[in-house]
Image (cartoon, helix red, strand yellow):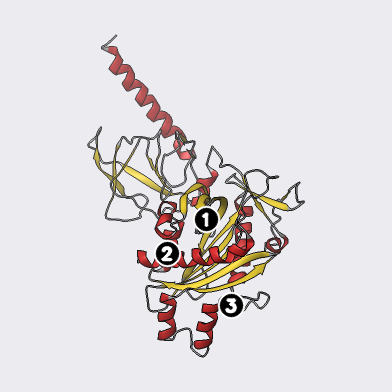
Amino acid sequence: EEKEAPFLIKIAFQFTDIMLATISPALSSNNTSMHSVHSKSNGTELRLLEDVDTSCSLNNEEFYDAHSCAVDESSVYSVYFDANATVSTCSESDDTNDTGSFDKSSSEDTEESQSCIIECIPTMLYAKTSITPSPTYFLDVPGVLLSKMDNDIEVPLMTCEHNAGECFAFNNHAGNETYVQNVLDALIRHSLELLADNNLSIKWQPDDATKKLLQKYATTSDEDVQWMQLLEEQVLKWTTQVDNTPMLKTRGIINMTPNELNNLLLDCERVQEYNKCSLGKKDICAFHPLCGGEAKIVEHVMQIPIVGGKVETLSLTHSRPLVDDNAGFVIVSRSVKKELNDTVGNPCFSISSLRSIAGTKKTELTTLTSISLPIPKFLMHRVAFYGADDFFCNLRKIT
């Protein structure tokens, strides 16, 4: 029986190869015999996708046989071998990005060179293959946000019992992507409108220091050297009310590119570098908006400056590139809740505009933040101003 075992194993492998060779032509139109569905332990399922880009390339990555699929989750690439492939290292040949010209540079089981096909799975398609959906979080949708949505897309909204308001359910369930995108688009439109200097519907009141500076440099252009130096050292501050909510707007220059600053502000592990009051910030789950950028649910615990106490927030955070002439990013955060009929305990709403300053590697940072803290009203502005000054000061120290 021991002598027969290798023979039987060989017969089994040959039978498998015959089956693969038989069914593979019907499964692909690009001459690859990949056909498997691979389920990973974390619940991710990768399937054969038709009409996908084949413009990716990989170098010195280890992958597996025809029954497996190795995926680089950071860039969402999947690689499939043909039916005869074995555990090996796949590297680019001279003909980069040619889907038929990838060779194995080494192999544990065979000396014969094998080819593999690189398939680039778009981010949204990757999200659709998730077996374990993300939790659902609910975003309150006031009338002003609803008015910014695309009327051609009927977004499914739910009614909250305690205030009869409407909510949108955020999750990465298949089929929900278009609705998520429409809500994010509306959120960005509303945010940029609030930030616009020419928005005459909002009456911003400068604090005393900002008022004096604006009067002194009233005839100075935004490109003036002295004005630019001032914004690199000072923080301009205004306050107003939007929908009966106190808001603070700040502006200053940070010695980083918009991309560097965007990455820093989205990195939860680095929050204490610029927010000394933070007691911890973490990403709960992420979404993949069609427009690019980043969308995620974030949990944050902070100590309230000056007066003490803690505040916990749960928010949807979305960042995307600006599309106008000035390169940069816009980041929006808005409170969400875990249950439809919950009440947001500590509502938060913030906007950050990161605009590149031409000819430099610096960013003009403008922020708008709701002032909503569980403290006496007469202290809110003082606490908010302290937090704003500290935020800009710490960012400038990083650079």
Image quadrant holding the C terminus, namely bottom left
- Image-based side of 260 in relation to 192, left or right: left
Q: Is residue 214 above or below residue 46?
A: below
- Image-based side of 173 in relation to 150, left or right: left
The residues bearing labels 1 and 3 have C-alpha atoms spaced at a distance of 30 Å
Residue at 42% over, 55% down: 272
The local crowd at label 3, few if under 14, some if 14 to 19, many if 20 or more residues have their Cα within 10 Å, is: few
Give amino acid for label 3: Asp
Residue sitting nearer the eye, 263 or 203: 203
Verify CB contact (< 8 Å) between mark 3 and mark 2. no
Q: Identify residue for label 3.
A: 197
Q: Position of residue 357 (x, y in %)?
A: 43, 76
Give amino acid for label 2: Leu
| Circle 2: element type | helix
Q: Position of residue 394 (x, y in %)?
A: 40, 64
Label of residue 261 in the image: 2
Label of residue 304 in the image: 1
Question: Can residue 321 be seen?
Answer: no
Count of numbered circles in the view: 3
| Circle 3: element type | loop
The residues bearing labels 3 and 2 have C-alpha atoms spaced at a distance of 22 Å
Residue at 59% over, 45% down: 174
The residues bearing labels 1 and 2 have C-alpha atoms spaced at a distance of 24 Å
